[in-house]
Image (cartoon, rainbow, N blue to C red):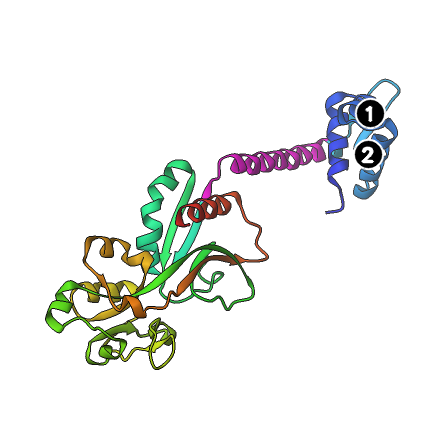
Amino acid sequence: MKTTLEELLAFRAVVDSGSITAAADQLGQTVSGISRALGRLEKKLGTTLLRRTTRRLELTEEGQTFLARTRAILDAMDEAEEEVTARRQQPAGLLRVNAASPFMLHAIVPLLPEFSALFPKIELELNTDDLNVDLLAQRTDIAIRIGPLRDSTLHARPLCTSRLRVLASPAYLEAHGKPKRVADLASHALIGNSQVASLNEWPLRGPHGDSYPATLKLSASSGETMRHLALAGMGIVCLADFMTEADRANGSLVQLLVRDTVEVRQAVNAVYYRNTALSSRITAFLDFIAARLQ
């Protein structure tokens, strides 16, 4: 576009106020500045927009046509600015959030009634995936990731950490006995992750150091499936606190080998593209979630 906002504002102000002098007062500029802006505009368009007489200014036919377009452009800009300002005051719009299903179910979903009450104009689309997703391909605004981050193109905001514990149900322990040493795990049914091998290195002290390589009898791609297998008495599992807090509190799962457990905390981060400016709805969500997860 050849024309500038300054030139469009000057043109509209001259027409609305009836003179260059009045337009200069209205815009807080000099008379010569308004006159030069009009001159540049007409030169760029290659036509005369206003006929100037000693008594008044009169729009040409081209000026009338251009004025209608000018008003539409400036009105649209005013509406856009008002909308952005309103969203800063009351965040609104669609927000797509992706997280592994256990974290979504146990950590995010319980907080959403309060979030929706505070930000009723934000529309949430919640997607779950137990593996890292491509934010652009999945049209995701925020992805919540657990563990080390590898993608350097993403900006990360720390949300919390979650401790890992080795657990089993009372039913399993009654049927198979309680392991008293890390070495006893070799004779038990261990439940682990079928997709991420590093998650099967349990934080237990033993001959292998501070990490125990679990030999699995059962495996699943989802931590939530692993949790349900453990609750059903199918074996021993290593899971993060965020998905087992209620189970441990009501006795459905019992921590094992407490003295041999190394305190390992998985980092939980919200990630988004670095070259994406955070809108008010993204900021509102991250501030809300981070404050409560801490």
* Residue 268 drawn above or below residue 217: above
Q: Secondary structure at mark 1?
A: helix
Q: From the viewer's perspective, is 173 left or right of 134?
A: left
What percent of the width, then of the height, locates residue 41? Answer: 80, 38
Q: From the viewer's perspective, is 162 left or right of 86?
A: left
Q: Extreme top residue here?
A: 55
Neighbourhood count class around disc 1 (C-alpha, 10 Å): few under 14, some 14–19, many 20 upward: many
Residue for badge 1? 20
Q: Amino acid at mark 2?
A: Leu
Q: Secondary structure at mark 2?
A: helix
Residue for badge 2? 38
Q: Quadrant of residue 113?
A: top left
What percent of the width, then of the height, locates residue 180? Answer: 22, 73
Dot 2 and dot 1 residues touching (CB under 8 Å) = yes
Neighbourhood count class around disc 2 (C-alpha, 10 Å): few under 14, some 14–19, many 20 upward: many
Q: From the viewer's perspective, is 95 left or right of 153?
A: left
Which residue range is magenta in the image? 64-93
Q: Is residue 69 magenta?
A: yes
- At horizontal 37% and vertical 36% (from top left) the residue drawn is 117
Closer to the camera in the image, 252 or 3: 252
Decide if residue 120 is in sight here.
no
- At horizontal 55% and vertical 36% (from top left) the residue drawn is 83
What percent of the width, then of the height, locates residue 189? Answer: 20, 76
| Cα distance in 3D space between marks 2 and 1 | 9 Å
Q: Amino acid at mark 1?
A: Ile
